[in-house]
Amino acid sequence: MVKFTTEDKLAAVQQYLEGVRTYASIEAAIRTSENIVRTWVMQYEHHGDEALKKSYTSYSTQYKLDVLNYINVHGTSPNETAAIFNITSPALIREWRIQHVINFHKNHPF
């Protein structure tokens, strides 16, 4: 997996928002998926430059449950929710959902 600097991400976001490039052309130019570029754009729209800076965050169990509850209440996608909560990867939220279901079934056997 390619690592992108904050400057790389910001340049891609600005190119998209200014109408210079499409998601597909940015994807091809920097060799990443459209979904990653879309996530950067959504994060930028919600949180500005700070959202694109690298961060290594450990999330508490309560925070994870709050995020999952937000999805249930508002019907947002993992991508949109990641942007709203400034979570770097929507895949993390998908993992939390799976883990939550596994833990639920461990505590509530059939």
Image (cartoon, rainbow, N blue to C red):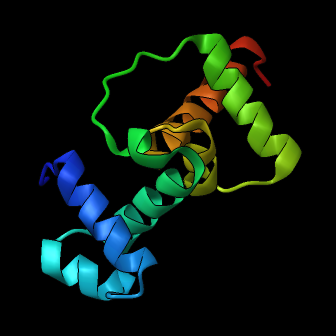
Q: Position of residue 32 (x, y in %)?
A: 22, 68
Residue 7, compared with residue 53, is above or below; it is below
* Residue in front for this viewpoint, 106 or 53: 53
Against 24, residue 49 (above or below) is above
How many marks are shown on the rendered structure?
0
Residues 61 and 103: in front is 61
- Residue drawn at x 41%, y 57% is 40
Determine which quarter of the picture holds residue 34.
bottom left
Q: Is residue 66 left or right of residue 46?
A: right
Quarter of the figure with residue 45 = bottom right
Judge from the rendering whether residue 107 lies leftward or rightward of residue 63; answer left or right: right
Viewer-side residue, 104 vs 79: 79
Q: Is residue 55 left or right of residue 67?
A: left
Relative horizontal placement of residue 39, taking residue 74 as reference (left or right): left
75, 104: nearer the viewer: 75
Q: Residue visible at 31% across and 23% down?
A: 56
Quadrant the C terminus occupies? top right
**Vertical arrangement, residue 72 with respect to residue 60, above or below:** below
Q: Residue furthest front?
A: 18
Q: Is residue 85 above or below residue 61?
A: below
Across and down, in percent, residue 10 comes to: 30, 58
Q: Residue furthest right?
A: 73
For image coordinates 78% across by 37% down, the residue present is 70
Please tell me in which quadrant of the rendered image residue 50 appears: top left
- Across and down, in percent, residue 46 comes to 59, 50
Image point 62% across, 23% down: which residue?
A: 64
